[in-house]
Image (cartoon, rainbow, N blue to C red):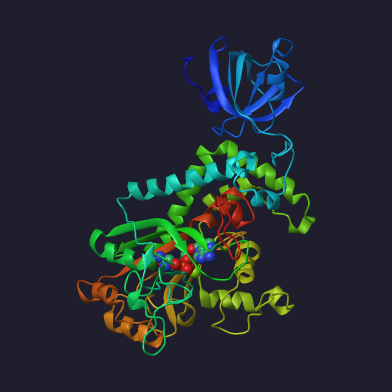
Amino acid sequence: METSRRTKVKELLDSTAFGSTVIVKGWVRTFRNNQFIAINDGSTINNIQAVVDFENTDETLLKRITTGAAISVTGELIESLGKGQKVEIKVKSLEILGDSDPEKFPLQPKKHSLEFLREIAHLRFRTNTFNAVFKVRHALAFAIHQFFNERGFVYMHTPIITASDAEGAGEMFRVTTLDFDNPPRTEEGKVDYKQDFFGKSTNLTVSGQLEGELAAMAFGDIYTFGPTFRAENSNTTRHLAEFWMIEPEMAFYDLNDNMQLAEDLLKYVIKHAMSTCADEIEFLKNRLLEEEKQKPQDERSELDLVSKLNFCLENNFERLTYTEAIEILKNSTPNKKKKFKYLIESWGADLQSEHERFLVEKHFKKPVILTDYPKDIKAFYMRQNDDGKTVRAMDILFPGIGEIVGGSQREERLELLEKRMQEMHIPAEELYWYLDTRRFGSAPHAGFGLGFERLVLFVTGMTNIRDVIAFPRAPKTAEF
Ligand code: 4AD
Ligand code: MG
């Protein structure tokens, strides 16, 4: 091993090059008995122990080895006699790179609540939990690109600023450079967006799907993976105002092909995370077990995190129609005993997360794909079924999460699409470019959106979506 360069802790912990001189740089997690420094450099959740010969070390230097301080240690790699580690470093020289005042540093070597850590999100990466969560997040992002790349999909970057509402739900953040206190007005007294930066009213994208469809009509198979923004005032553990979405779009796919691709993608990326982040997931499994000890027995998960992930890999997702699901829900015990907050009384009801979770966690006990929803609760672009009531939609529901994927086969027939847009008051003139795909070489196609943070939530076993994105954006929350 070279001695002029630092070696990462992850590599050292697996090393057997005993007797060699190594350099470690990292942050002090703990310093015990004026002797044992636990150093973490982020390369692994595990620390390496460095042992200081305190009798021959300057007292003022020892005082500066505090939790949070950045240090550089040069020493001999030796086999450890202590419990819990195979190797340690016998310190030859030690340098403080950056002090950390122990009176002021908020992360103490003890357990902190996730709520507290959310308030210091700029420092929480330095905890084991967040080290593990963000390693898993990285692995999942990498696996997503690998999955699509192996299958010949083209990665498209769709615009962040757009003039259209892809979902037609009106939950958009406006983008403007107009003077908010004194905007230019039209003769009718409305804000004159013609004078705005883009010469029209614009917003942050809620989805890259519409642009994705344009590309799919040329490349065949494409996907997007980027940030999306929703101004929905949902203060829940599963909603963010800024989240990342993966949106594949495939020409010549029908709904079955679409569902199969989504199931294959989810299994592939979960498997990849389990094999590349085994330590992290093991840590998160134990964290969850600890956390669940606080809960009453009947609220605890039946399966631990690793078993839950394996279970998801080993089973086919249950596929059924919305209509079949409504029948199950109508006759379910919580519906009959009025335990649901929103009772299912008739066909057409929108499913709430309590219903989704009942189907997945109690009824089928595995991931579920619901198809053919009523057209009135779905977006304008979904392909209409012959029954005149339903559309070729599919939602994938996951245990503990509810909806993780939403997608559909698209309406490729110009006339039917135009009619539906009119019924739903979607401005066709502004979307002329979208309709052009149906005018010139229209073809059956399908796609879906996978909420990236919901996926990370599932694989890490975390319970609040704000703990799987670095700096969460949510109502009244935009710190850092
Ligand atoms: O179901 P949604 O709204 O579908 C679309 O946006 C389609 N354009 C996708 C497509 O067909 N290309 O959103 C897709 C997924 C949801 O299933 C959910 O996982 C996630 O995005 N999602 C959110 N995640 C976090 N916070 C929010 N506010 C979310 N809204 C949707
Ligand atoms: Mg949806």
Residue at point 63%, 80% (across, down) = 344
Closer to the camera, 320 or 361?
361
User: Height in image: 134 above or below 248?
Assistant: above
Residue 312 shows up from this direction: yes
Residue 405 shows up from this direction: no
Residue at point 53%, 50% (across, down) = 314
Residue 37 horizontal side relative to residue 6, left or right: right
User: Height in image: 137 above or below 433?
Assistant: above
Closer to the camera, 12 or 109?
109
Quarter of the image for residue 125 reads top right
Residue at point 79%, 56% (across, down) = 296
Residue 335 pos. (x, y %) = 69, 77
Closer to the camera, 454 or 207?
207
Residue 189 pos. (x, y %) = 41, 87
* Extreme-bottom residue of the structure: 188
Q: How many numbered discs, if any?
A: 0
Residue 29 pos. (x, y %) = 67, 31
* Extreme-left residue of the structure: 440
Residue 268 horizontal side relative to residue 186, left or right: right
* Extreme-front residue of the structure: 182
Residue 58 pos. (x, y %) = 70, 14
Residue at point 68%, 24% (across, down) = 37
